[in-house]
Image (cartoon, rainbow, N blue to C red):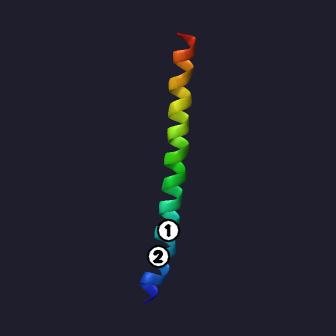
């Protein structure tokens, strides 16, 4: 009971952090791929 109660929030937090990180990574990749394209 304590295991599920303690792991549930952490799993949700990990998923949230992963989602935000992937979102930030994708935006960084698009910005990085756009800058060389504009210079060329």
Q: Quadrant of residue 35?
A: top right
Q: Are marks 2 and 1 in contact (CB under 8 Å)?
A: yes
Residue furthest out toward the bottom? 1
Badge number at residue 8: 2
Residue shown at the point (55%, 52%) measured from the top left: 20
Q: Secondary structure at mark 2?
A: helix
The quarter in which the N terminus is drawn is: bottom left
Spatial separation of the CA atoms under disc 2 and disc 1: 6 Å
- Residue 36 place in picture, x, y as percent: 53, 17
Front residue of 1 and 23? 23
- Residue drawn at point x = 55 percent, y = 35 percent: 28
Residue on which disc 1 sits:
12
Count of number-bearing discs: 2
Identified at 52% across, 9% down, the residue is 40
Q: Position of residue 13 (x, y in %)?
A: 53, 65
- Residue 7 horizontal/vertical position (percent): 45, 76
Judge whether 30 appears above or below 24 on screen: above
């Amino acid at each position: 009971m304590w295991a599920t109660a303690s792991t549930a929030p952490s799993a949700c937090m990990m998923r949230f952090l992963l989602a935000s990180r992937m979102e930030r990574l994708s935006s960084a990749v698009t910005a990085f791929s756009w800058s060389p394209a504009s210079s060329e």
